[in-house]
């Protein structure tokens, strides 16, 4: 018999978490496609006759940005039960696992809340708000992969890379916002200008780093969750007479071995 690394969970929990992870990953890829379409559409509709700082606030790209927001929120919502499942797989005696789960829950809930605020009060909140809690998701992902959590080495490495990307998104957003002023998260307090064209060292550094974080976090993270979901669903039907154990040695359910 050969073993395949999969988080140790009871069959029903594994099936639910696997389905949620797979759907979250698909939504993550969809949200990245929406974001890319929005940025390309906005670039194609730039008016060269306008000054660099003058911004056109609404256009064909707006609907794509809002669709991206919704997909990001649904992705985060689906990852909440996955976060709880990964905590269960680490065993009840893991203090680090408990702390990581709290951070992960706060990050995913924060993304959902941030998007809800932007959609409900679009005239007030900047649409970059959701980027900040993505940093917490990155920290959670790094902690989960660093601890093992029943994942293969390759899966853990890609998870750490994705987590670093998500953390870089939050750090880039923080650097840019600190340069512009935190009060400008309320868009009613700032003039209608193209934020990317504002010349300051912090703003330029943040915009230089953001694409790297986006590629690592917004592409690799969904792929990581799809692989996790596929593994969990694949092993949702196992021999119930064979036992697996969590990292603290507590029996959890059927074995994660295959012939």
Image (spheres, helix red, strand yellow):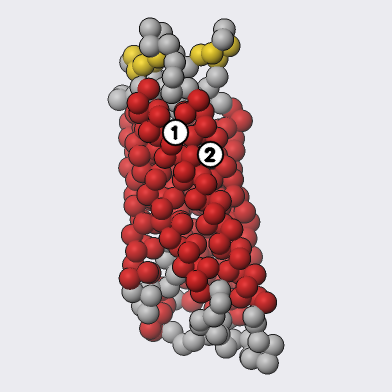
The answer to whether residue 1 is left or right of residue 13 is: right
Q: In this view, does 246 lie above or below 37?
A: above
- The image shows residue 195 at horizontal and vertical percentages of 54, 78
The image shows residue 248 at horizontal and vertical percentages of 36, 18
Q: Dot 2: within a 10 Å radius of its alpha carbon, few (fewer than 14), some, or many (20 or more) residues?
A: many
Instruction: Name the residue nearer the viewer: 121 or 53.
Output: 121
Q: Residue 174: image x %, image y %?
A: 48, 64
Q: Is residue 48 visible?
A: yes
Q: Can residue 141 be seen in this view?
A: no
Farthest residue to the front: give it.
Answer: 237
Residue 226, labelled with which disc?
Answer: 2
Q: Is mark 1 on a helix, strand or loop?
A: helix
The x and y percentages for residue 103 are: 36, 45
Residue drawn at (36%, 78%) of the image: 124
Residue beneath the point at 56% across and 10% down: 259
- Specify the quadrant that holds the N terminus: top right
**Direction left: furthest residue:** 92
Does dot 2 land on a helix, a strand or a loop? helix
Nearer-N-terminus badge (1/2): 1
Left or right: 225 as drawn, with respect to 121: right
Q: Mark 1 points at which residue?
A: 18
Identity of the residue drawn at 59% across and 38% down = 158
Q: Residues within 10 Å of mark 1 (few under 14, many from 20)?
A: many
């Amino acid at each position: 018999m050969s073993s395949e690394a999969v988080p140790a969970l009871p069959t029903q929990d594994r099936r639910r978490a696997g389905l949620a992870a797979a759907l979250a990953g698909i939504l993550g890829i969809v949200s990245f496609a929406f974001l890319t379409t929005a940025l390309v559409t906005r670039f194609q509709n730039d008016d060269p006759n306008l000054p660099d700082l003058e911004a056109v606030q609404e256009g064909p790209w707006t609907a794509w940005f809002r669709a991206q927001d919704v997909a990001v929120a649904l992705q985060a919502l689906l990852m909440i039960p996955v976060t709880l499942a990964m905590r269960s797989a680490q065993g009840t005696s893991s203090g680090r696992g408990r702390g990581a789960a709290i951070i992960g829950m706060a990050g995913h809930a924060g993304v959902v809340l941030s998007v809800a605020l932007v959609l409900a009060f679009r005239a007030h909140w900047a649409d970059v708000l959701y980027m900040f809690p993505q940093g917490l998701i990155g920290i959670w992902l790094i902690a989960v992969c660093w601890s093992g959590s029943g994942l293969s080495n390759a899966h853990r490495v890609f998870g750490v890379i994705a987590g670093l990307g998500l953390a870089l998104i939050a750090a880039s957003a923080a650097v840019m916002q600190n340069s512009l002023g935190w009060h400008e998260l309320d868009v009613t307090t700032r003039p209608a200008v193209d934020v990317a064209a504002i010349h300051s060292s912090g703003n330029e550094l943040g915009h230089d780093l953001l694409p790297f974080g986006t590629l690592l976090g917004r592409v690799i993270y969904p792929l990581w969750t799809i692989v996790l979901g596929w593994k969990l669903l694949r092993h949702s039907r196992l021999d119930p007479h064979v036992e697996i154990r969590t990292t603290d040695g507590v029996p959890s359910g059927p074995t994660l071995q295959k012939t």
